[in-house]
Image (cartoon, rainbow, N blue to C red):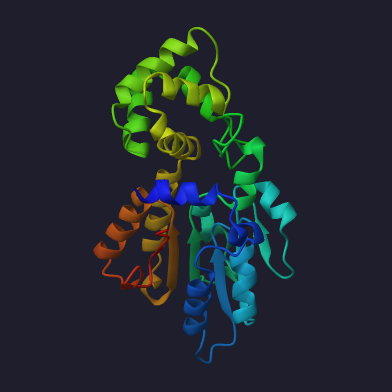
């Protein structure tokens, strides 16, 4: 499955990601360069998922005549990855229209969905299932909801729906039953406990999917993506804009593809000519 391949790849000791060349940076940079090739003096871009700033940095090298707003829920990413002349905003990307430059519409809307390498390498985020990490998974540390909150407090039905809808887990009811049984004995607080639970019911092979489902639930990822696409659709001239979205897993990919098809937007990426989606397929 797409998200399993992506997650496993990111959690390997990979030299490219350690040096942090962002996913599909050449393709994104080339697309932006082509779009900005006319006589317009200034372009405005919003990087909805600024993260380490790697995509933004590469784009600025390709197209110096571009003003960029970088948005991220994670204040640590913004504080640790500043770039000269880039406006940084600690906000959810669904609110990108609130941060327009001089009140003008963005010419380019870019998003690289999912977490970044600094977050997965920092155990405090709890995004990696390698080693004993806290079941946190929040991008926004101001949020109160963590993965451990979900595991220790959600009902059987709520847990089953999360595992089924966000992780495509086989037999989610079985897993929900076991979690409720275990939390009666002690709180489920770290990745080792969760892995032990999965192994005890012969579901250890689905650990990555379980992590994905919890992360999506904690951060409201699919809800936010839906709102982002709807807000793009409300822009009068959005079909004249360059919209690039790198999807991390198949659930996101399906949403973006559906949006593009409904809006009759051209495609670039994955063998399809698209200006709305570049899917990360590893």
Give the image quarter of residue 68.
Answer: bottom right
Seen in the picture, residue 229 relative to 85 is either above or below; the reply is: above
Q: Quadrant of residue 180?
A: top left
Left or right placement of residue 238 versus residue 117 in this view = left
- Frontmost residue, 229 versus 27: 27
Kindly give the residue lying farthest to the bottom in the view shown. 39
257 lies left or right of 278? left
Image location of residue 42, percent across then percent down: 59, 82
Percent position of residue 196, x then y: 49, 21
Q: How many marks?
A: 0
Quadrant for the C terminus, please: bottom left
**Residue 134 seen from this side:** yes
76 lies left or right of 115: right
Above or below 251: residue 87: below
Identify whether 32 is placed above or below 209. Answer: below
Does 236 sit above or below residue 191? below
> How far from the left and from the top, in percent, is residue 54?
63, 64
Left of 125 or right of it: where is 266?
Answer: left
Depth check, front residue: 75 or 208: 208
Identified at 36% across, 24% down, the residue is: 202
Residue 73: where, in percent of width, then height? Answer: 59, 48
Residue at image point 47% right, 35% down: 211
Q: Identify which residue is drawn at 37% across, 37% down.
A: 167
Q: Is residue 141 visible?
A: no
Observer-nearest residue: 87 or 151? 151
């Amino acid at each position: 499955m797409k998200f399993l391949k992506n997650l496993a790849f990111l959690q390997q000791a990979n030299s490219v990601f350690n040096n942090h060349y962002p996913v599909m940076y050449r393709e994104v940079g080339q697309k932006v360069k082509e779009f900005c090739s006319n006589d317009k003096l200034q372009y405005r871009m919003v990087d909805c998922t600024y993260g380490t700033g790697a995509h933004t940095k590469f784009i600025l090298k390709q197209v110096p005549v571009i003003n960029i707003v970088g948005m991220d829920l994670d204040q640590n990413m913004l504080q640790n990855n500043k770039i000269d002349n880039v406006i940084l905003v600690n906000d959810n990307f669904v609110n990108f229209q609130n941060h327009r430059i001089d009140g003008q519409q963005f010419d380019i809307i870019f998003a690289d969905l999912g977490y970044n390498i600094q977050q997965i390498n920092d155990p405090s985020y709890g995004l990696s299932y390698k080693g004993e990490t806290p079941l946190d998974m929040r991008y926004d540390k101001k949020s109160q909801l963590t993965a451990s909150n979900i595991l220790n407090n959600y009902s059987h039905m709520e847990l089953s729906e999360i595992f089924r809808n966000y992780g495509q887990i086989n037999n989610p009811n079985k897993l929900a039953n076991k979690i409720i049984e275990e939390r009666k004995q002690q709180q489920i607080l770290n990745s080792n406990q969760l892995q032990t639970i999965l192994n005890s019911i012969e579901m250890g092979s689905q650990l990555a999917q379980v992590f994905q489902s919890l992360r999506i639930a904690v951060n409201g990822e699919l809800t936010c993506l839906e709102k982002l696409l709807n807000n793009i659709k409300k822009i009068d001239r959005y079909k004249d804009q360059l919209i690039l979205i790198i999807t991390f897993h198949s659930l996101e990919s399906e949403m973006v593809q559906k949006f593009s098809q409904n809006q009759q937007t051209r495609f670039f990426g994955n063998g399809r000519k698209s200006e709305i989606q570049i899917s990360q397929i590893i």
